[in-house]
Image (cartoon, coloured by chain):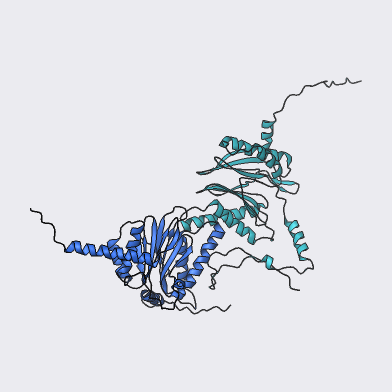
Amino acid sequence: MARYDRAITVFSPDGHLFQVEYALEAVRKGNAAVGVRGTDNVVLGVEKKSAAKLQDSRSARKIVSLDDHVALACAGLKADARVLINRARIECQSHRLTVEDPVTVEYITRYIAGLQQKYTQSGGVRPFGLSTLIVGFDPYTGVPSLYQTDPSGTFSAWKANATGRNSNSMREFLEKNYKETSGQETVKLAIRALLEVVESGGKTIEVAVMTKEHGLRQLEEAEIDAIVAEIEAEKVAAEAAKKAPATPKET
Amino acid sequence: MKLDTSGLESAAPVWGAPSELVDGFSAAPSFEVPNTTDFDGFQKEAIQMVKPAKGTTTLAFIFKEGVMVAADSRASMGGYISSQSVKKIIEINPYMLGTMAGGAADCQFWHRNLGIKCRLHELANKRRISVTGASKLLANILYSYRGMGLSVGTMIAGWDETGPGLYYVDSEGGRLKGMRFSVGSGSPYAYGVLDNGYRYDMSVEEAAELARRSIYHATFRDGASGGVASVYYVGPNGWKKLTGDDVGELHYKYYPVMPSTVEQEMVEVAGA
């Protein structure tokens, strides 16, 4: 099998790997994605570009499961994502085969990040143009986790994070508004973060919740619409409360 | 006619992704096939020549308090006893033991190799490897060397997050999970005593005594087993060596010499 020798990702004189940085640019142009970790669940949300009328939206799922207890959402080049996801899925099963145990979220994140790094240090290939948000539950301890990887191959754990288009605004919002939540509150927080940068509606966002008992569940459009309506109502109520004059203290 | 060598290909998974990028991991071991008319017959003969008889007795069983592991300490080369003090219980790490039966070098090397892999797993995953995982790693390695003359009949005993674990792994690539195992030429004798005296709820002392007696009885009848009967206990805090008794002394402990009545004393005949 012919091996390519020439490296494409090489250092610049001032220590940058431009191909990796360009890959991060590609990520910044990708659809917005957000992940929030609750005490008993983890939520992933992605922006859905409005589907063409004739397109079967179910075939273009953006939040995928890697195993029963691990799911992934990504921002960037979708074709690269497909390859990475396939390799991760194989690794999940291979791990089950060799040690008779499901992967931990950290293990599969490390594997994906390692794969992304390999492609920044090999001949004849370019880096993967995507950042991933990986969520899941530890098969033993049942603790939920959220991890993020990027094209350079680094990864870290997060309480809540965003990637893709306008990720900075979403992250700022999350930093301001994050608190330990569970159940529906976590879902609301994720959707509120997405709504900062995406036009509202069940048609434009895709949300999935992972719980220990039920695994990954994709929310229906109607459900998302209902929650968005709730959020809007809360916003209106908050605005009204601010505008209303304070009750006078003296009689 | 091209011989079908697919059976010699390894099925063991290579560490790391099966990627087009060559990571430098070598392909599984294989050797050139000799040019004979009857390859299967030749292979059978070759294996028979290389296969030592696994002259030993080792046993392990799970009971209420944990796992009991015991073994003899004799190494024999045919009819010659080469050593009476071989360590047949190998300490893989502080909470896992392996027993040795078959080729001593094979067992020692691959157990040590398994210890390395277990430690690497701990470092990479920040948690101890399970007994299931460790036994599977060893079984996969042995399977990839199947047919090449390795002789290993081992039991992996340990205590992990799911409690006590016991697996039998051999060089044919077999791997069995179980509550009681005995491996070696003395194992039929050991099984007789072990199966007869086994109860799940024994105390540590009772279980140790059962293990010791089983090894003793095996050494009594099997010529390839002898030396010292070592007994180890694996509990929630790891393994601990309990006793190591010479089986010769154990014999007189179990069957003390009774003075027998003399019916007729011999009398010296006076010289003519």
* Count of numbered marks: 0
The reply to whether residue A16 is visible in this rendering is no
A251 on left or right of A207: left
* Chain B display color: cyan
> Which color is chain A depicted in?
blue
Q: Quadrant of residue B83?
A: top right
> How far from the left and from the top, in percent, is residue B149?
69, 58
Q: Residue at x 53, y 61 (%)?
A: A95
At which x and y percent is residue A80?
46, 74
Farthest left residue? A251
Please tell me which residue is depicted at 48% across the width and 69% down the height of the picture. Answer: A85
Image quadrant in which the N terminus of chain A is located = bottom right
In the rendering, at what x and y percent does residue B215 appear?
66, 40
Is A163 positioned to the left or the right of B226 in the image? left
Answer yes or no: is residue B187 visible: yes
Please say if A179 is above or below A22.
above
Residue at 59% from the left image edge and 35% from the top image edge: B206
Residue A208 as seen in the image, left or right of residue B48: left
Q: Please tell me which residue lies in front, B77 or B161.
A: B161
Question: Residue A100: where, in percent of width, then height?
Answer: 55, 56
For the view shown, which residue lies furthest in the right direction? Answer: B272
B232 relative to A172, above or below: above
